[in-house]
Amino acid sequence: MGQILGLHTVIYGVADITEARAWYAQLLQQEPYFDSDCYVGFRLGHSELGLNPDARSAISRADGVIAYWAVADIAAQVERLGAMGARQHSEVVDVGEGVLMASFLDPYGNIFGLIEQPQVQPEDSNQ
């Protein structure tokens, strides 16, 4: 019946969509596939990261809800995000079997999670 197939879309509320678009384009190292005043969408494999200025007032910052994005080298991404001005929300933690997780607060107050899974090849991370 209703099978959950995987992460499809994560939408972050932002106060300034132009500024957020530029920040996330730098973070993701790509331009959005959809770019308007009401929504900006980035494709990441089979997933999407969306930016929505209207969601800002409707979203409360609940630490219990974090989307984790696969990375090949978490240490390099931690350094990169720090250099981009993101604040570390949680330290890198080995949660078992070499799986590493960490999270950051983007400049807009959203939690951006990272996960490195050594057993998953980068090209397999969105399957």
Image: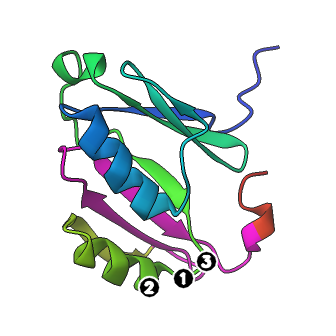
Crowding at dot 1, Cα within 10 Å, few <14 / some 14-19 / many 20+, comes out as some
Q: Is residue 1 above or below residue 96?
A: above
Q: CA distance from mark 1 to mark 3?
A: 4 Å
The image quarter containing residue 63 is top left
Say which residue appears at 40% left-offset and 57% top-offset: 113
Is 125 inside the magenta-drawn segment? no
Residue 66 % position (x, y): 37, 45
Residue under numbered circle 1: 73
Say which residue appears at 17% left-offset and 17% top-offset: 57
Crowding at dot 2, Cα within 10 Å, few <14 / some 14-19 / many 20+, comes out as few
Residue under numbered circle 3: 72
**Are the residues tagged 1 and 2 within 8 Å (C-beta)?**
yes
Q: Is residue 39 above or below residue 120?
A: above
Q: CA distance from mark 2 to mark 3?
A: 9 Å
**Mark 1: secondary structure:** loop
Residue under numbered circle 2: 76
Q: How is the image coloured?
A: rainbow
Residue 111 % position (x, y): 29, 49
Between residue 17 and residue 66, name the one nearer to us: 17
The image quarter containing residue 56 is top left
Three-letter amino acid code of the residue under disc 2: Ala
| Numbered range of the magenta stretch | 95-122
Q: Is residue 17 above or below residue 95?
A: above
**Are the residues tagged 1 and 3 within 8 Å (C-beta)?**
yes
Is 107 inside the magenta-drawn segment? yes
Between residue 31 and residue 55, name the one nearer to us: 31
Three-letter amino acid code of the residue under disc 3: Ala
Residue 26 % position (x, y): 41, 62
Between residue 67 and residue 25, name the one nearer to us: 25
